[in-house]
Image (cartoon, rainbow, N blue to C red):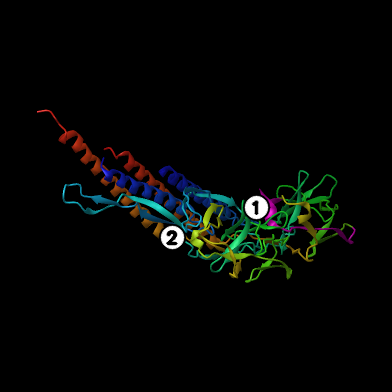
């Protein structure tokens, strides 16, 4: 069979994946602390074509066999900080993450849309506790608190806890688990305590750039279309081979 | 699966529509006394790992695909609205934190709208009630009732209500206390400017107006809605564009599906 058929199909599959990731980015265009996905595509291993004719020997050259989404990175460029007027909204100015007690151990987020829970804990909207650098919950007990730039939570000038902030050697290696949370992987390295300045009453907006996303979507679509045309051409070639070359009548 | 892209975009359209809904609600209440603006907090949905790095030592991260967006919460902005002088005797505004308590069929609800009026009772006295007839509660939990023939009611900034009786003597009828929830987000909107408290009992305190934690009561004034028109307009535009962008993403995904269908043309 024509190898090109599968090469073109692999190109289409990569474009479908890219469209899925772009759709997720665009869906999260108003999600605080959201970081856009980046996809790295790589080619499949190349084949070496060998000459089969008698006597000549040697190789002809290489043949590509298609593309695959090799790696999904995360774009950690900062989103714009917007003043909200809610005292429980916190934003990080610079690289770093808030620490929360996630579903399976500590998780990390840049979405500082926190609340004070009914029991007085500082938590995310779905109830994950915000942690200090030591891994302890922060109990302001009221939403009438002040957060200093170095992360100290003050209730009537009494210290209620220090907001934990961490960085990673390679943030792009973090894995998203939904709910604006990230978890470390061997690629990201372990969390390291950081002193990223905290801004109270601000939220970091999504860093999805609509213009870039739409342009990527257009070029991605055309690449998909081109791969589809290549596949059709291969199919027609195959059709000719089967139906015309192999005709035995007359 | 191209369908996943379509569903992710659909969730984005749905999220944008909800943001328009909340913004519309804020804009509709821009002249509602005591109204607190709401906003929508979003979160990304779960991710499906399509390619997992083989060796742990591998510096690769694998490929994961998200499923779109969901609404995490619709918190309110609790900051003070501006105070407007109305001159009406039973227009009460709270200058600072705290909520009036009103009784609604045995349940205590909380409000900052402060538009009260007198409701005559069969025995000649009159109760201070809100627009829907819910009585305003005093510090001791009784309804605020003015004796028959009482004139010139005055509510002091500290919440003390005094009237002149028919005989001419000045008496204190009661003291209005404010409820102060430690975590404002534990209040759940019930409409009519009312909130129900959903937190733990020890998270809600009664404070005297003008003391630590409680605002002062201003008679003849109303607290305006704290809706910020420019912010709402920006949110409206952002939501509209987000809706368009996600609709466009669905169309693109659909065209890709169409191309797949036409492979064997």
Instruction: Identify the image quadrant of the N terminus of chain B.
Output: top left
Q: Could you say which is closer to the camera, residue A207 or residue B182?
A: A207
Q: Exactly how many numbered labels are in the figure?
A: 2
Which residue sits furthest left? A250
The relative height of residue A245 versus residue B48 in the rendered view (above or below) is: above
Find residue B212 and report its horizontal and vertical position in percent.
Answer: 78, 66
Give the Cα distance between marks 1 and 2: 29 Å
Residue A189 in picture, x, y percent from top left: 54, 62
Residue A209 disc label: 2
Q: Which is nearer the N-term, disc 1 or disc 2?
A: 1
Query: What x and y, as percent, mark residue A247?
Result: 15, 31
Q: Which mark is residue A167?
A: none
Q: Disc 1 on helix, strand or loop? A: loop
Q: Chain of mark 1?
A: A
Where is residue B189 drawn, in percent x and y?
Answer: 66, 50
Q: Is residue A214 left or right of residue A123?
A: left
What residue do we see at 54% from left, 69% from top?
A94
Chain to which mark 2 belongs: A
Q: Which residues are magenta?
A: B167-196
Q: Mark number for residue A127?
A: 1
Q: Residues within 10 Å of mark 2 (few under 14, many from 20)?
A: few
Q: Is residue A237 magenta?
A: no
* Quarter of the figure with the C terminus of chain B: top left
Please, what is the dominant secondary structure of the magenta stretch?
Answer: strand
* Residue A204 in the figure: left or right of residue A134: left
Residue A43 falls left or right of residue B191: left
Position of B173 with respect to A82 (left or right) is right
At 79% from the left and 54% from the top, the residue drawn is: B202
Figure quadrant of residue B210: bottom right
């Amino acid at each position: 069979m024509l190898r090109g058929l599968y090469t073109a199909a692999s190109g289409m599959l990569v474009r479908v994946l890219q469209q899925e990731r772009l759709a997720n980015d665009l869906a999260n265009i108003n999600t605080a602390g959201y970081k856009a996905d980046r996809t790295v595509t790589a080619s499949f291993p190349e084949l070496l074509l060998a000459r089969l004719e008698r006597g000549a020997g040697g190789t002809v050259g290489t043949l590509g066999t298609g593309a695959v989404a090799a790696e999904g990175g995360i774009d950690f460029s900062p989103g714009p900080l917007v003043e909200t007027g809610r005292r429980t909204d916190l934003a990080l100015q610079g690289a770093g993450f808030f620490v929360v007690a996630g579903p399976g151990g500590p998780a990390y987020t840049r979405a500082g849309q926190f609340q004070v829970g009914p029991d007085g804990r500082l938590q995310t909207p779905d109830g994950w506790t915000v942690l200090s650098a030591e891994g302890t919950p922060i109990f302001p007990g009221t939403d009438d608190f002040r957060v200093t730039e170095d992360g100290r939570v003050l209730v009537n000038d009494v210290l209620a806890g220090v907001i934990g902030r961490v960085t990673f050697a390679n943030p792009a290696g973090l894995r998203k688990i939904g709910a604006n949370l990230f978890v470390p992987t061997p690629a990201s390295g372990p969390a390291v305590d950081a002193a990223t300045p905290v801004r109270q009453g601000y939220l970091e907006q999504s860093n999805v750039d609509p213009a870039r996303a739409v342009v990527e979507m257009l070029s991605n679509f055309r690449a998909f279309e081109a791969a589809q045309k290549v596949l059709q051409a291969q199919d027609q070639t195959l059709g000719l081979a089967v139906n015309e070359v192999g005709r035995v009548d007359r | 699966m191209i369908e996943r892209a379509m569903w992710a975009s659909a969730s984005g359209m749905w999220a944008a529509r909800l943001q328009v809904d909340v913004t519309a609600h804020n804009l509709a209440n821009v002249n509602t006394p005591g109204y607190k603006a709401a906003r929508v907090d979003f979160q990304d949905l779960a991710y499906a790992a399509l390619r997992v790095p083989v060796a742990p030592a591998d510096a690769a991260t694998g490929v994961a695909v998200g499923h779109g967006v969901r609404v995490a919460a619709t918190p309110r902005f609790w900051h003070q609205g501006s105070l407007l002088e109305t001159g009406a005797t039973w227009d009460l505004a709270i200058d600072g934190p705290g909520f009036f308590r009103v009784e609604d069929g045995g349940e205590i609800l909380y409000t900052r709208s402060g538009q009260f009026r007198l409701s005559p009772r069969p025995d000649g006295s009159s109760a201070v009630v809100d627009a829907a007839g819910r009585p305003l509660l005093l510090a001791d939990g009784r309804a605020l009732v003015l004796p028959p023939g009482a004139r010139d009611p005055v509510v002091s900034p500290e919440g003390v209500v005094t009237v002149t009786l028919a005989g001419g003597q000045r008496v204190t009828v009661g003291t209005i206390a404010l409820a102060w929830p430690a975590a404002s987000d534990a209040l759940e909107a019930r409409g009519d400017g009312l909130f129900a408290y959903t937190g733990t009992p020890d998270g809600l305190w009664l404070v005297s107006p003008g003391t630590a934690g409680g605002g002062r009561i201003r008679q003849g004034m109303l607290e305006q809605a704290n809706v910020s028109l420019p912010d709402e307009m920006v949110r409206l535009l952002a939501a509209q564009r987000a809706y368009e962008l996600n609709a466009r993403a669905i169309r693109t995904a659909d065209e890709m599906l169409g191309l797949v269908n036409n492979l064997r043309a």
